[in-house]
Image: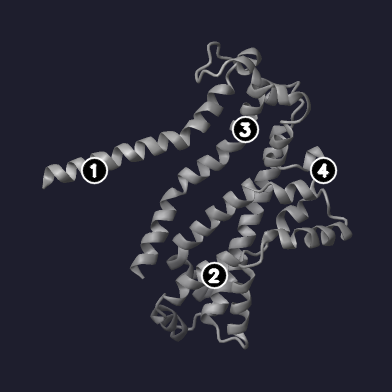
Amino acid sequence: MMKKSMKKNAFVLIIATLLAIVFLLPLIFMLFTSFKTLSEAMSSSALLPKEWTLENYGSIFGIAADVPVIRWLLNTGIVTIAGTVLVVFVDVLAAYALARLNLPGKKFFFTMVVATLTIPGIVTLFPMFYIFRELNLINTFAPLILIYSANTMGVFLVYSFLKGFPKDLEEAAVIDGASLWQILRFVIFPAIRPVVATLAVLTFLTIYNDFLWPSVVTSADEMKTVTVGVANLVQGANFVNPGRMMAATVVATLPALIIFVAANRYFVRSVISSGIK
């Protein structure tokens, strides 16, 4: 019996390793290509470079760099952090109101929230663009951040968790004279922290990797996000320099990858918490 279990575990480990290699191979190829010279990147399909060079990264971060990757990363950081904080704040308040407060028309509003999940994002893209254009906010941070001011999936996620959360602690806090804000801050929020962390990470990655909306509302180089900026590197003279494109892609991918790996434990906690409740 033990031998069968060991064989099964070994088989699962082998399959998992092979799948990991398949998924990681493009990232590995991207990383090694970024260290190749121009001639080798154009002519060689070998994984490892024969001659290692930092020239591609120097063309991005050097004094004479003509690609403002650092500016793109700064823009992306501002938009991503501000958008994530805004989404979490609005979604938690909305979910708490819908799940706990006795509001008139609460069921109707919740139905509308769920109904918006069926609306494709592309449907609202151009109306939102025209609104921001009429307000003269194109090529500013406002449309890049405010478009993420609420996330209906996040409202539904937190709402679903709160509906299964017992009210005993809240009732005890009410008896002790706690306000609604104090209940939310000191009773509810510590309990839903894994769910909120999961929402924050998913929102962060979504905003960080968004390409369509930033490409619509930004045209000036100094206002572009890193996804739009890196996409522009496949145009013009940069198209014939794979090493430089890969170096820029590595720089763009690294922050999101670090955030995902660091926050992976929150996903596990959220799943466990959902199962326990």
Q: Which mark is residue 221?
A: none
**Image location of residue 43, percent across then percent down:** 61, 15
Looking at the image, is mark 1 or mark 3 nearer the viewer? 1
Graded by Cα atoms within 10 Å as few (under 14), some (14 to 19) or many (20 or more), the crowding at tag 3 reads many
Residue type at mark 3?
Thr
Q: Residue at x 33, y 67 (%)?
A: 276
What SS does tag 4 mark? loop
N-terminal of the two: label 1 or label 4? 1
Q: Residue at x 73, y 62 (%)?
A: 123
What SS does tag 3 mark? helix
270 left or right of 120 in image: left
Reply above or below: 90 against 176: above
* Viewer-closest of 124 and 135: 124
* Mark 1 and mark 2 residues within 8 Å of each other at the beta carbon: no
41 left or right of 213 in image: left
In this view of the protein, can residue 147 be seen by the observer? Answer: no
Colour mode of the rendering: one colour
Residue type at mark 2?
Phe
* Mark 3 and mark 2 residues within 8 Å of each other at the beta carbon: no
- The residue wearing badge 2 is 156
Q: Which mark is residue 219?
A: 4
CA gap, disc 2 and disc 4: 34 Å
What SS does tag 2 mark? helix
CA gap, disc 1 and disc 2: 37 Å
- The residue wearing badge 3 is 249
Q: Looking at the rendering, which quadrant does residue 190 occupy?
A: bottom left
N-terminal of the two: label 3 or label 4? 4
